[in-house]
Amino acid sequence: MNPIAVYYDTTVLYWSAIIITVGLLAALMMSLSLQVTNKGRIVSMMLFFPLALAFSIPLCRMLHWYCHQEQYDGFFKAMTDYSAGSYVLPAAIPGVWLAAWIAAKLDDGDTAKLLDAAAPGMALVIAFVRLSALFSSACRSKISVTTGVLQHLPIAAGITNSAGVTEYRFATFFVHFLLMLLFCLLLLKFFMKYRNFPMRAGRREGNTVNMFLLLYAASEMILDSTRYDSSFLPQNGFVSIVQIVTAVCILLLLIHYSRLSIQANGTRIWHWLLWALWLVALGCGGFTEYLVQRHGDWYLRCYGAMALCCIILIAVVYRLYVTASGRIEDEGEEEDEGKPAESAE
């Protein structure tokens, strides 16, 4: 049941909708301020947000319909009646990129620069979307929490089952809310500190949004596994579509920064070591997904191992970014400049 916040005549406003709206407004204000800081044009950011919503919502709905056709009365009904059903959030990625490209072109701007300024705001939007689930019946975790001391946020959320009994399950969406808030702060720091660092290979623009995509994809890869309503392709019942999309995103980022790192440093043995570590982490993550589906009481061990694998995936891609950037050299120069000059003897 989705609690009603305002009910007047025929007008009904739900708490979840209010929270999402507040998140969108906060994200817009943050993105506008970062756009100004980045010497970008405000008009392009104002164009970007409505276009991103217009493109992303139908794509998220379309992919959910494809994976859950039994929940809808045909494709047309799914795409026109949004009072029921759900969405596959990572499907918004192409819609957001297309919106940024159109907004930048209409305002004679730069797509990557626009997305960099919007990246922390996008993390904030996702955080509020996940928070809104606490005010609906959308706590969809399959992990039951039976230990009394853990039966509260941020670990567990209470839901009423079909028998009218309250049971506690792992608070998947609230944990994701906390993670996305943390990612928003990390992206803000990254944007303010490193956006002007020169790259030894590639452009300095686009790295903030790449870090957003990396963090978001890794978090979705593990947390989607905890949900009982994950979306699967009709031909595949093992790995969810969210896990597939997020794994592909991380792979593309690995390829992107590997190419830039090789351009900057040449092919080194540590490239091969990083690639091998990435493949091992991905393989171990897939194996733990298999184990957790076969052994329902291994949640803690499997998801602990899967979290470690996701951290390794992030660390490898981030390390490749660092080796392709000028951060190491520039930070060394800044330290040298801060030291007092030695007097000549």
Image (tube, grey):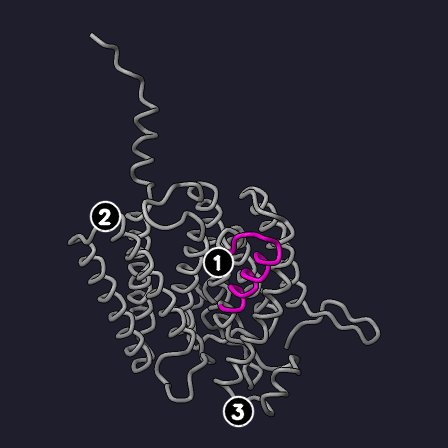
Residue type marked 2 = Asn
Residue type marked 1 = Met
Residue type marked 3 = Glu
Disc number for residue 265: 2
Residue nearest the observer in this picture, 166 or 280: 280
Circle 2 or circle 3, nearest the eye:
2
Nearest to N terminus: mark 3 or mark 1: 3
Distance from disc 1 to disc 2, alpha carbons, whole Å, reads 33 Å
Residue 308, compared with residue 195, is above or below; it is: below
Disc number for residue 180: 1
Nearest to N terminus: mark 2 or mark 3: 3
Is residue 244 within the magenta segment?
A: no
* Magenta segment, prevailing SS (helix, strand or loop): helix
Residue 196 in the image, given as x and y percentages of width and height:
44, 41
The residue singled out by tag 3 in the image is 70
Residue 257, compared with residue 92, is above or below; it is: above
Apparent side of residue 76 relative to residue 211 in the rendered image (left or right) = right
Q: Quadrant of the C terminus?
A: top left
Q: Residue at x 40, y 78 (%)?
A: 240
Query: Which element carries disc 2, helix, strand or loop?
Result: helix
Neighbor class of circle 1 (other Cα within 10 Å; few <14, some 14-19, many 20+) is many
Distance from disc 2 to disc 3, alpha carbons, whole Å, reads 52 Å
Is residue 109 within the magenta segment?
A: yes
Residue 98 in the image, given as x and y percentages of width and height:
53, 66
